[in-house]
Image (tube, rainbow, N blue to C red):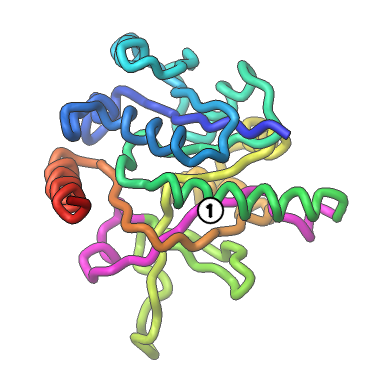
Amino acid sequence: MKIVGIIPARFNSTRFPGKVLALLDNRPLIWHVYNAAAESGILDAVCVAADHEAVQKACAEYNIPCLVTGTWHPNPTSRIWEAAGQVEADFYVMMGADEPMISPGDIRQVVHQAVKAMSETSGLPESDRPFVVNAMASITSAPEVFDSANIKIVCSQAGKCLYASRSPVPYPKGSLDYSYKKFVSIGVYTKEALDFFAASPISRLEKIEEFDLLRFIEQGKNVIFEDISGSTLSVDTPKDLERIREQFEDRKRNEK
């Protein structure tokens, strides 16, 4: 069994161009994600899927394996699909290039649970097995709930995703007794799932929310979310980067 980690690195981000090369503790964000993936000990190989010479150059500088992908990809899953055509594996693990605070333990937990669930149910009908497995984490503040950059996840008791939205879902009309969950960029795919995604048109809800996993959900595929306990924060804007730099320094002080 071969498990390959792929870090999709889109250079020209709409709100923060070049963010994947922004520095955190004097190293680019992609280095931190790659380092966490390498230290997880559960991946047979890890590489960056790049669409720009600057990212390729940075990868070479830090000895990070790099795959060249096109600039046309509208989302990470599409880029992972192209990269998967260049490296053979049983499972592909996506880790967002803009989530430098994910830990090796988070990656190890999600991949272990995903591979276990997918392997144990491989002979069952598609309706009875996970098609994609992804990570989610608790939202710890009200502003995060209302921040459209955080994709809120609503799951069944078994962890199957019922819906995902940039809006606050569920809406707290009858009760405030609810722990909101957000999408975290650690996802496990098979080649079957990636090929299905690439062959399927952009779905109605995916287009509205601009969230690629809704393509699977809207077509009835089982997307399972694994709850992680780690604290995560993605870099969507320069302001996010400043917050992460503060968190990073706090973490370093606590480790001393």
The correct choice, above or below, for 144 with respect to 4 in the image is below
Decide which of 57, 37 is in the foreground and name it: 37
Answer yes or no: is residue 176 visible: yes
Q: What segment is highlighted magenta in the picture?
A: 125-150
Choose top left, top right, bottom left or bottom right for residue 7: top left
Circle 1 is placed at which residue position?
A: 109
Horizontal side of residue 247 vs 151, given as left or right? left
Horizontal side of residue 72 vs 53, given as left or right? right
Residue pictured at 37% horizontal, 46% vertical: 102
Horizontal side of residue 237 vs 164, given as left or right? left
Q: How many marks?
A: 1
Q: Label 1 is placed on what type of residue? A: Gln
The correct choice, above or below, for 206 with respect to 31 in the image is below
Decide which of 205, 80 is in the foreground and name it: 80
Q: Position of residue 35 (x, y in %)?
A: 38, 32
Indicate yes or no whether the magenta region holds residue 186.
Answer: no
Choose top left, top right, bottom left or bottom right for residue 254: bottom left
Which image quarter holds the N terminus? top right
Residue pictured at 59% horizontal, 66% vertical: 159
Residue pictured at 16% horizontal, 27% vertical: 26
Which element carries disc 1, helix, strand or loop? helix
Residue pictured at 43% horizontal, 45% vertical: 104
Indicate yes or no whether the magenta region holds residue 127.
Answer: yes
Q: Position of residue 155 (x, y in %)?
A: 54, 68
Decide which of 13, 224 is in the foreground and name it: 224
Q: Position of residue 17 (x, y in %)?
A: 23, 27
Q: Residue furthest bottom?
A: 174
Q: Position of residue 247 (x, y in %)?
A: 18, 51
Answer yes or no: is residue 204 visible: no
Decide which of 161, 188 is in the foreground and name it: 188
Choose top left, top right, bottom left or bottom right for residue 93: top right
